[in-house]
Image: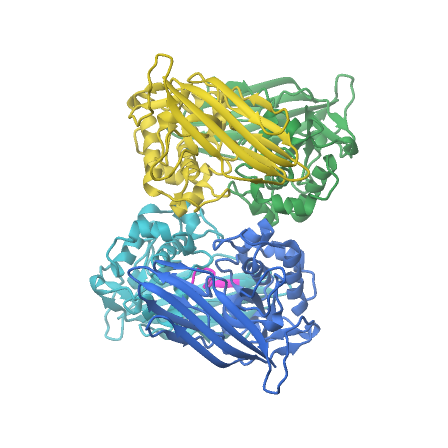
Chain colours: A blue, B cyan, C green, D yellow
């Protein structure tokens, strides 16, 4: 059991006449991810509403801020108890056996135009062993053909754009892997959260976007950008793609600054300090 | 209360090694649309699974067909008891007050790239009276700038393609209206079904696609292509766009032929025969 | 020296008020392609204007047809005297040494968005030996990743669409190869004509589109679709892409039917009958 | 006769192994634009080649720079003697009468996808009086639907992107107007140069992009962004779109800084000082 403590600070200047926000910055509740404690502080005296999505465990916070400064601070301690499985034993689920609420993750979405990639997916992955290993092969294909590069993509950039440009950030790697999974009839979704640990190249901890593919009756984690350690992901939201789970969707005139994020591993109840590490097993935090 | 009797026949030739289907051809269950009786016949001896989506009332039927002929025949008698309201009294719902399960219909989707249309929507509709009337203005704008033309679009065609091409079929009109509603912060979804009555120009009854916008706490019907009579729509499925509610999603080698559809108005329990007609009121079959 | 005799028949029904046409159906005049004799017949009594483009040797025929039937028939006997070179000895030309009228073929065009493919071209071809062999490697890459399939593309389809769809017709293969050549700083152009010989799979002789790359001071022929025999190409027009050299650009209401084309090899002046064949040498018909 | 004196300074840091440049920064030679004197200074001891394009009067300068600093300074005094005509008397030229070298400007190009805009152009402009007035109506339509906004577009942005986004810079306005002109069968080209006079809103003089449409046998100037004074344009290059006439196309590793540009009106040979002003007449500097 890994215990992670995270802090998240968002700063906005809200202009007249105020602004509605939809935030996706609460650690999700799943069987494998338990929020031990959490605090939310808002610099304005406003009452947010927080709703739990039962399918994904995500929590959505909505609030209306008045003009002026808005600081949102969220602190949490999260316990991760991963489901761990052996890649070779995880099979794909036939379309006829997929749970109804998983079907939507087979279909194309705004940034994951799987409908245009069937032929390419068939050509590249159609002959491979099925199951977790095929999803892993798709992950590896995406990583090997794409260069991580800041400021090469924007909020319009889609999976097909990334396939062509061969560069992007974690969001773009995730969209391309998702589109190729769906084109291969593997349900896949876009998941956001925070990654453990500062990367020596990419700099400090930041929001992260990664992929979950539905295999063997669970959602397994994949990190196609290869820039983080999947065992250390604290999950916030899951959706069809970045359109669904922006950390902040903003309806009004606002100026924001870069989020300030910290995360650290702490000792668990048994007094053990477990630092997330790269492992060869398949990991899931949502079953 | 309108009573409609419909028949639907789909014919496929399925090749080895067989094929999975996801059908969306059952009349939905909503408070305003009651299925009085229905029959499903399959020419192969197979057991389909039918699931109800509680949020939308849609029913999804999955089955696996073996090689050979597959005929799917669905007959139903449906009672429509529309919620009717006065357009001037239907207001938009603030983002902060939207039900959580409606939020997804604010976001861009595969064929409705609302994220690219904010400026255009602001320019064209930002100054208009809000509420049902603004959604109606969007509907009228789409209809007036788009020509109904068969064989000008395909399954890749998106709202932006239609905005540029200025032509399409009912699916394309719906996608463009949805994208512009979402860009105006009005939740909108894509709904499929069957339209009542043979059109003298467009020919016999067919599958139809139209729009529902979330206003005044309900989903109101809009028909941006202007090719049908909204009062006579029998609803099948609702989703983010055509990706979610294709009448048939097919996973295998198949040859299909054109669906054969009939619909007629019949006398209701009080012995009245009500034929759907164009009306100025706002109609809803999902609250 | 190869002698080819070709006939070409185009049939249109022109509606009121008549129609302007720009045709690109004359065999080009180049040093290596000599038109021994040619006849043009029009079923309407109209005087076409035919202009020679000195840079490419293409001829453009313009005419205005009145309402009614228009038949255009073009017969020609063409002598091909290819420039033949050894692939290993053909070098790329530095940008600074390119003739000024070649520079335009380095830039992106409507269907060849080379500006979006620099990274991909660098990744795939940047490390290869330069010269004809690099262009050949691009040709082979395109052929190996793309399936020839009728009715999968249309007049809007671009190189990037084809890269994603991984299928198309000769026009699409040509656009993709051109875009990748330009992204690799190799000037490339789109050339149309007729290919010798009926293909057992693709059916009778038809219009063909292929690529010329500027290497070693000449334009060398490449056939990325691999569906024809380059030695048997009768060249009509060369341009930046299909936008420039459509065999017919039509400005008015018209209904056309499929062109009727024949081609046969005939004995040359020395009485030899040379049938075009596949060869390993580099061929050029424009220096 | 207007006399303008301009200075242009470009600064680059060139990295190993050096870099090829194609510059388009010489004032063009046309009948109406006479270069009275000009000086070119390069900070490296290299010999550029400068070629004149006889069709457009543009001059292309190519050079190879070694690693280190490269400063390019161009000073010129230019005399403008505009062809001036009355808008109502300028007619469109029938396709059959267009000079052969104008035909290419009817076809779609990389950033001006006129082939996708025929229906929209017909709908919006098909019923208007033809001639200069129709081109002017297209100009006005573009200006009225598009907001000038820095940093909203990039080098991939096309006419269709701008139509959808409804914002951009001078390059984007020009591409959209060109695409709509071609879709209306009016040849149109992209022209670059420098605009006279610092704009109080947009800041100091800069490179400018505008449109020339072929009407009445000449190329007439249009400024769809409405941000400059057409009478004060010093013409550099003309091409199909921005792909053809970038002020600098760079083949190698380089870091550049913003160009430094000055322009001033000076007295002409008769001692008159004429300051460019907005006028209602049609202006042309290329016949």
Q: Residue furthest bottom?
A: A270
Res B111 seen here: yes
Foreground of the two, A116 or D239 = D239
Q: Which residues are magenta?
A: B239-249
x then y, percent, for residue A31: 54, 81
The quadrant the N terminus of chain D occupies is top left
Q: Nearer the viewer, residue B12 or C60?
A: C60
Q: Residue at x 53, y 31 (%)?
A: C244
Count the labels in the image.
0
Main secondary structure type of the part rendered in magenta: loop
Depicted B53 relative to depicted C203: above or below: below
Q: Is residue D9 left or right of residue C92?
A: left
**In magenta stretch: residue D147:** no
- Residue at image x 41%, y 27%? D263
Q: Nearer the viewer, residue A112 or C272?
A: A112
The single residue placed furthest to the top in the displayed view is D270
- Image point (37%, 26%), residue name: D232
Image position, residue A38 (x, y; %)? 47, 79
Quarter of the image with the C terminus of chain D in it: top left
Judge whether A120 appears above or below D247 on screen: below
Indicate the position of residue D257 as horizontal and vertical percent values. 52, 39
Residue C243 in sight: no
Which quadrant of the structure image shows residue D172? top left
Q: Quadrant of residue A284?
A: bottom right
Q: Residue D23, percent across and down?
A: 55, 30
- Residue at the image point whose x is 43% and y is 63% from the top: B240
**On the picture, is C50 further left or further right than D264?**
right
């Amino acid at each position: 059991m890994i215990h992670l403590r995270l802090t998240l600070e968002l700063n906005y200047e809200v202009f007249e006449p105020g602004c509605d926000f939809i935030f996706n910055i609460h650690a999700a509740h799943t069987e494998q991810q338990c929020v031990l404690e959490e605090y939310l502080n808002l610099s304005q005296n406003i009452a947010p509403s927080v709703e739990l999505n039962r399918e994904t465990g995500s929590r959505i916070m909505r609030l209306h801020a008045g003009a002026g400064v808005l600081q949102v601070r969220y602190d949490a301690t999260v316990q991760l108890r991963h489901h761990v499985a052996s890649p070779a034993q995880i099979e794909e689920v036939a379309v006829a056996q997929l749970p109804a609420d998983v079907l939507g993750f087979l279909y194309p979405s705004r940034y994951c135009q799987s409908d245009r990639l069937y032929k390419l997916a068939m050509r590249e992955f159609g002959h491979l062993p099925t199951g977790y290993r095929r999803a892993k092969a798709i992950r590896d294909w995406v990583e090997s053909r794409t260069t991580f590069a800041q400021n090469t993509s924007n909020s319009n950039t889609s999976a097909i754009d990334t396939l062509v440009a061969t560069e992007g950030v974690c969001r773009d790697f995730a969209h391309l892997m998702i589109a190729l999974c769906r084109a291969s009839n593997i349900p896949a979704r876009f998941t956001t959260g925070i990654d453990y640990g500062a990367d020596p190249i990419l700099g400090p901890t930041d929001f992260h976007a990664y992929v979950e593919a539905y295999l063997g009756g669970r959602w397994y984690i994949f990190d196609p950008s290869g820039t983080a350690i999947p065992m250390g992901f604290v999950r916030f939201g899951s959706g069809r793609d970045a359109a669904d789970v922006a950390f902040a969707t903003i309806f009004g005139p606002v100026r924001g600054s870069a989020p300030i994020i910290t995360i650290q591993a702490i000792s668990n109840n048994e007094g053990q300090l477990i630092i997330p590490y790269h492992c060869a097993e398949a990991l899931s935090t949502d079953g």
